[in-house]
Image (tube, grey):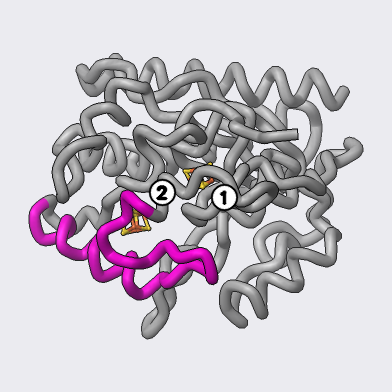
Amino acid sequence: MKSEVRKAVAETISRYLTEYCEANGTEPLWGEPLVGFADAHDPRFAQLKELVQDSHYLPEDILPGATVVVSYFLPFNKDIAHSNISGELASPEWAFAYMATNDASIGLGEAVCETVRGFGFDAESPKDIKRTEGTIVSRWSQRHIAYIAGLGSFGMNNMLITEKGCCGRFYSVVTALDIEPDQPIDWDNCPYKSHGRCGACMSKCRSGALRPEGFDRHACDKLCNENSHRYNGISVCGKCIVGMPCSFRNPRVI
Ligand code: SF4
Ligand code: SF4
């Protein structure tokens, strides 16, 4: 059943996003998704209360009796990524795609839940997961959840590098699916982390947020706010995930 659920969820996502673009008269904004299954009882969820913030949710907070968190990656269309390579500020196309993804993600989460329910299992979309007051982190870190779901590993750009790269967005729903979850990978897809090679994202970031010793969330946030003034509150940048060797593929060095 696991492969059937994965296929059905991927098909739901593709169909929903195609219809979203048609209904809104936009070019296709996303490529084919990736879908992973995180064990809702994985102890790494509890660790997110320390790693991200102490009010980070557990799957059980979203759906009592949770077993599996379905995580999915929506890669951006390559043209959108290319539009954002040059210039200091985010491109209008990038900001638009970001906003459209936020908009589509709500209905998409419900559509994924419906697909899971169609298999006879409960499912809930996480809600109220935006930054809490006084913090710049979410109560439901989609990238960490995607990591637990085995979709990839963190790169030096603080994004999760999947088999389809890192240039896209992650979302998830919490379910009571009775399937074997996927396992997190135990290697680094980022060649800087594994072999000290690359580092292109650190060279590109003009905020100084990306350094060998770690990610400075506040520096990144400050720069994203510059774009927010330009793009009506849409806090974006993304220069470190476009035009990179990890943008649309896994650059892992073995
Ligand atoms: S640009 Fe290079 S160093 Fe940065 S995350 Fe991608 S692969 Fe790693
Ligand atoms: S999003 Fe922009 S500011 Fe933030 S780390 Fe990437 S390049 Fe730097």
Whether residue 107 is visible to the viewer of this picture, yes or no, is no
Determine whether the beta carbon of the residue marked 1 sits less than 8 angstroms from the nearest atom of ligand 1.
Answer: yes
Q: CB atoms at circles 2 and 1 under 8 Å apart?
A: yes
Give coordinates of residue 141: x percent, y percent. 56, 60
Residue found 38% across the figure and 17% down from its top = 19
Residue count near mark 2 (Cα–Cα under 10 Å), binned few <14, some 14–19, many ≥20: many
Give the position of the C terminus as an image quadrant.
top right
Residue found 71% across the figure and 36% down from its top = 36
> Which residue is denoted by mark 2 in the rendering?
201
Determine whether the beta carbon of the residue marked 2 sits less than 8 angstroms from the nearest atom of ligand 1.
Answer: yes
Quadrant for residue 5, please give it.
top right
Give coordinates of residue 236: x percent, y percent. 27, 52
Residue found 19% across the figure and 37% down from its top = 86
Q: Indicate the amino acid at tag 1.
A: Gly
> Which residue is denoted by mark 1 in the rendering?
155
Give coordinates of residue 195: x percent, y percent. 67, 47
Give the position of the N terminus as an image quadrant.
top right
Callout 1 secondary element: loop
Q: Give the range drawn in magenta.
A: 203-230
Residue count near mark 1 (Cα–Cα under 10 Å), binned few <14, some 14–19, many ≥20: many
